[in-house]
Image (cartoon, rainbow, N blue to C red):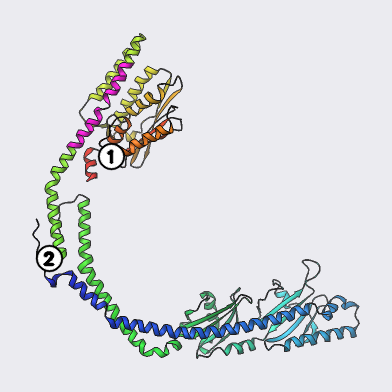
Amino acid sequence: MFNRQPFSLRNTIFLRLLITFLLIMLPIVSLGVYLYHWIVQTASEDISKTAVSQIAFYLTDLENELERMRLQQFGILEDEDLNELTLTWNSMDAFKRTEKINSLWKRLNAIQNSSMYIKNVSVDVFPISKSISSANRTQDLDPLSYYENHPKFDIRNNQVIEWKGSLYLSTAKQSATKGEQPLFIIVIELDTVKLREALSQLNTYAGSGTLLFSKKTGDILVSVSEKQLNEDTNAFISQINQSNLTQNGTYTMLGNHYYTAFASSDYLNMSIIRFIPEEIIKKPLDKFYTWAWLFIFATIVIIAVYAFSTYKFIHKPLLTLVKSFRRMESGDLQFVIAHEAKDEFGYLYGRFNQMIANLRSLIDQVYKQKIMTQRAELKQLQSQINPHFLYNSFFILNTMAKMSDVERIEQFTTQLGEYFQFVTRNASDEVSLKQEIHHARMYTEIQELRFSRRIRVQFDALPQEAEQVSVPRLIIQPIIENAFEHSLEQMKHSGLIVIRFEMEEREIRIIVEDNGQSLSDNGLEQISNSLANGNDHTETTGLVNIHRRVKLTFGDAYGLRVSRSELGGLKVVICFSSEGGDAHDSIAHRR
């Protein structure tokens, strides 16, 4: 039973956390922040709704006006006088030409007068090289005409086109021959002055501005703004194009903060952005603004105090405790944690130090006992293999004696003596991989004497860098024996066993596979389950025996893996560490 030290209230972490919490939760801070944000949000929403409503109404009105212009344009496409001038110009006399031109001019003039947004309406007739407009009557077609500079336009789209600082709506009468120049093009030039005057009516706040721009190209079509927005027009327009303004919100333009209201017309492929200086919105809130900064400053100070207190009184002691546990997990038991304060961490550190001391006193007993237990288990598992091969050896000798094969009996007994000399030697639980492979080769030679040419063994050379790796004895020969006994013994000819090696960084793999045809999918599944589910209460023979021994020596990450071989029979892969292993390391790993 541990003796607990009494706690003093003034030394508890609880009291420090409570005081810090009360400072953070001061009602005046929470109420002030809430009121400030609520008032700003309410004012912003009111201004935003008004601004969006105004520009949406303007954009709808402009949309209707431009649609009416387009309809008049399309009406001119079928004008009899225009089509007759285009197609029969050369056959007309001067009087007829003048009559048709005057009739067309009157119609163009009527269209111009139909809207205050129209500055000029013109028709460029390419077959007669004439340009007829409401402003200039008739003149020769300019080789640098609008069409020559804008060859890529859709005659049926509603997009306003910007060219040489002016805005245009255009449509054309196509030639009957595909790919040829159109017969004539009708262009309505919009009056940017009138558009600017209409947009200026939206600037009800000092310092505000309104922009009409193309959604497709991003070009500014009409710009109306106060003096501070016109100080650097090029930089201002460039920044608008780069900002991708498509939503209502607050943006910074040329170092000034503006609240923006946005409206868009998919029909015209145009958008309007209205800028309102942020100070206009916040002007009624000047008194709250000072208080807001005071609240922010107080909040920062409180957070700093809380962060420092939490780090010093909670985080740092906990971090010390976590590091101590990690040192203990790595096997370092030669340290103690010092803590002068008589708080909860002082109690925890004291119990931790006492636990470390108890572990140091018990570790020798438990550790040595586990080593002895595991060595006994290795001996027991190893001894299970030897009798099985002894029975087979006598059977082979009996068969050779019946066949009176004296020479092979002499060779077999010599090899068998060397084989059992290796098996019965108890000097060490482990041998080098080179010795283990030599013993397995000896076994295959013994079996080849028995099966003669019926079974062929392909034994690859052991890589030189793996020769001195320590492994448990008798982990390869029983697998080869299993292939002879359960897969190849009943085959009359062409039996094959392949033993090969693979190395990857810290892992060595020994692969034993055969071409036996007797292995079913159910049998393979049973072998896999035996390896995966084997426990201390299961009879440990054959592949399960070797699997457990490899895991005991090298750790749970290693052992046997089985699958169907590409040769057709069973494929067994023995995986173990290239750094070697022993029972001591295994026990330390399990701790």
Indicate whether 15 appears above or below 229: above
Residue lying at 46% horizontally and 30% vertically, measured from the top left: 568
- What quarter of the picture does the N terminus occupy? bottom left
Identify residue for label 1. Answer: 554
Q: Reading the chain from its start, which is encountered first: label 2 or label 1?
A: 2
Q: Which picture quadrant has residue 5?
A: bottom left
Q: Is residue 408 visible?
A: no
Q: Is residue 9 above or below residue 572?
A: below
Q: Position of residue 307 (x, y in %)?
A: 26, 72
Magenta residue span: 372-395
Label 2: element kind: loop
Q: Residue visible at 22% across and 50% down?
A: 330
> Is residue 214 rendered to the left or right of residue 310?
right
Q: What's under tag 2, amino acid-wise? A: Glu
Judging depth in this view, the residue of 415 and 154 nearest the camera is 154
Q: Are marks 2 and 1 in contact (CB under 8 Å)?
A: no
Magenta segment: does it hold 100? Answer: no
Measured as percent of width and height from the top left, residue 133 is found at: 77, 84
* x and y percentages locating residue 514 in the rendered image: 42, 28
The residue under the point 80% across, 86% down is 105
Tell which of 466 and 576 is nearer to you. Answer: 576
Q: Is residue 341 above or below residue 91?
A: above
Would you name the residue on which mark 2 appears?
A: 340
